[in-house]
Amino acid sequence: MKKIGIAAFFLFFVLIIALVFSINNFTSTGTVIGIGSKEVILYDFYGKGCPHCAKLISFLDDIELKYSNIKIIKKEIYFDDANRELFQDMAASFGEEISGVPTVFIDDKVFVGFSDSIGASLEKEIERCSLDGCNDPMEHVKTPETTSIVAESSPLEDPGKTKLKQSLTLGAVISAAAVDAINPCAFAVLIILLTTILAADNRKRALYAGLAFTFSIYISYFLMGLGLYSAIQAAKFTHYFYTIVAVLAILVGLFNLKDFFAYGKWFVMEVPVSWRPRLKCIIGGVTSVPGAFLIGFIVSLFLLPCTSGPYIVILGLLAKTATKNYALLLLLIYNLIFILPMLLITGAIYFGLTTTHKAEKWRKKQLKILHLIAGIIILLLGIGMFVAMYFGWV
């Protein structure tokens, strides 16, 4: 048990580091060392998934490192109604009808799109404002002196299409979470844990242990998802990753269907057979509520082979279609749905509605049906992702 505690503490420490990295990725605006003396305020309006916007953001990241006096305010307009309204108001104050993103407002100038020449002109404007001083674009009043510089840009997305994309993403998250929630692996582990605790004839302790175990699974999976989502965003290869996870979804779906028609042949979409004795031994050593909480972090690693498929698919989808705040909300919802059956089983056993023996018997009896349901849903999700790409919905 001491070794288990040390391992759990180590895993918890790693997860905390992942959280710190994720929070930094979600909130940081860059650290800068530069040469200017007067503050330069720049507004960048961009769209999630817009290739020209990604190039501009990369350029502005370098600019932030070069000029300590620059304040870059980034506003995503495909998914944020408030930002879209601000963009329209600011464009109107500059007397511009803008049809593309990215769009940058600085002093009395508007830069639409991005290219090497736009980047050079924009940096010259930043240097001028650093020396001479410039107005905050937010306080701009329409004048004949407004200058527009236009290059290649991406079209402004129709708000109706944006709403459709959000609806599709929410539906996909709920569906994939439901697939993960009915995964027989998680059921099996929880039942073994509760059986061990109940051997001491302490029903209340079994309740608390089940809740602690479920909560630790929620925390570990949420942090893993948050860290991977942040890594995908930082790497800026969301389109390629989206395509990869669409293929992965189809494969995971087909493998689950294989487990329905030919269970046990070649492999199963569950915890590897060779891991199971070790996993059972680890869980069998838990006799307390704190131990159940700590063991949840370790068990989450054992469960990855059979639960990570739908999760990775959803993370790829969120990285492609969702803003950071919206993705954070959907990750919270996903993991809540994922642990819901664990809470129900724990409660049912505590209130005497069933026993661990009956729960395990039901799990084994429905094993193939659970694989069939999971296979159909995740296969349709993968196909739907390709359909969304084909029609340009994402």
Image (cartoon, rainbow, N blue to C red):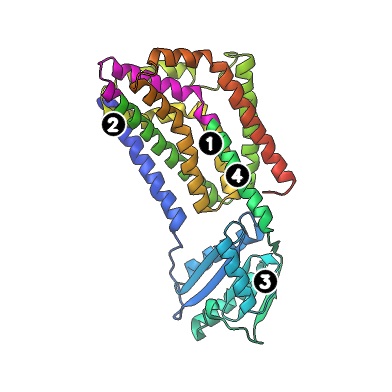
At 60% from the left and 61% from the top, the residue drawn is 77
Q: Upstream in the sequence, badge 4 or badge 1?
A: 4
- So how many labels did they put on this image? 4
Q: CA distance from mark 1 to mark 3?
A: 41 Å
x, y (%) of residue 286? 29, 22
Q: CA distance from mark 3 to mark 2?
A: 56 Å
| Magenta span main SS | helix
Q: Upstream in the sequence, badge 2 or badge 1?
A: 2
At 68% from the left and 76% from the top, the residue drawn is 96
Which residue was labeled with disc 4?
169
Which residue was labeled with disc 2?
6
Identity, as a three-letter code, of the amino acid under mark 4? Thr
Q: Is residue 87 left or right of residue 13?
A: right
- Look at the image and tell me whether residue 237 can be seen: no
Which residue was labeled with disc 1?
311
Q: Is residue 354 left or right of residue 149?
A: left
Assign a secondary structure to mark 2. Answer: helix
